[in-house]
Amino acid sequence: MSEKHIVIFGAGYSGKAFSRASKGAAEILGTTRSEQKFASLRQAGIAPLLFDGALTDEIGEALRKATHLVMSVAPEEAGDPVLNAAREAITGMPALEWIGYLSTVGVYGDYQGAWVDETAACRPVSKRSVMRVEAEQAWLKLGEQIDRPVAILRLSGIYGPGRNALVNLENGTARRLVKAGQVFNRIHCDDIAGALWQLVEASKGGIFNVTDDEPAPPQDVVAYAASLMGVEPPPEIPFDTAQLSPMARSFYGENKRVANAAIKATGYRFRFPDYRAAFDKMWASGDWRDGEARSPMRG
């Protein structure tokens, strides 16, 4: 098997988990908008590149060698920043075998708690999810034009080391918001990495929900984390009276249960099929504080 040369556009939390999972089996380069993040990328095994919406000579050279692309850059009003800057370069990549695009289950919109799979209609509610649908379509169309597989990974609420309810409880930011009937799916960053590698190795395109098996009320996740820590969970707060940012409130305006049979059909088996398995592992290993200490949006 030929050596893989992978370029990640937007090498953040998920991209670093993907690189760590490679265990040196590929050359991985990744972009960031800030040189201050170079050290953390190198620590994850990623050779850093600066990208702030313009194609540089350095990125152009990386694309000429790359066999795989992973996209983790949010779309903007003007469209997908990577396609806007590098469409021509990507179209002419001589070694390219596969493209992966990290999207969100937010593209489905609100299904009032019903189950959705990849055949469900996209009914995005927020502007950011509308732009995600447009970006997905643009990448799929490019794949057709250049005859390369494009995998769209629709991710649910991302968590993992440094980014979880245990961290939020320790730093005093955990809250238990209660909205009747509300559930969210979640996905551990190691399972994002695992699903990506599964699709890379199979050179498989298509649309895949990368999400756990158990949509659950967010307040239950906080309560479970508190039970592991042996602390009292914060009091329940009725959603109607909660002080929330517009973005946080918008998440609660969408309610769905997301099915994951398509990614399992590729042979992928989740390391953490539900939040309890993941929290048990993080608490037992003590690695829950590591990583980027940013609160997950959805519990």
Image: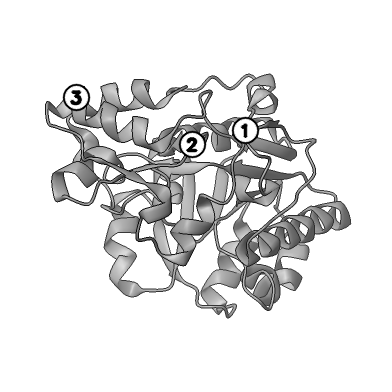
Crowd class of label 1 (few under 14; some 14 to 19; many from 20; radius 10 Å): many
- Give percent across and percent down for residue 234: 21, 40
Number of the front mark, 2 or 1: 2
- Determine which quarter of the picture holds residue 165: top left
The answer to whether any part of residue 228 appears in the image is yes
- Which residue is denoted by mark 2 in the rendering? 180
- Give percent across and percent down for residue 198: 59, 30
Crowd class of label 2 (few under 14; some 14 to 19; many from 20; radius 10 Å): few
Structural distance between the alpha carbons of marks 1 and 3: 27 Å
Q: What is the secondary structure assignment of the residue under circle 2? A: loop
- Determine which quarter of the picture holds residue 73: bottom right
- Which residue is denoted by mark 3 in the rendering? 228
- Give percent across and percent down for residue 24: 40, 39
Q: Earlier in the sequence, mark 2 or mark 3?
A: 2
Locate the N terminus and report the quarter of the image it occupies: top right
- Residue at image x 70%, y 36%? 203
* Vertical placement of residue 224 versus 62, above or below: above
Q: Earlier in the sequence, mark 1 or mark 3?
A: 3
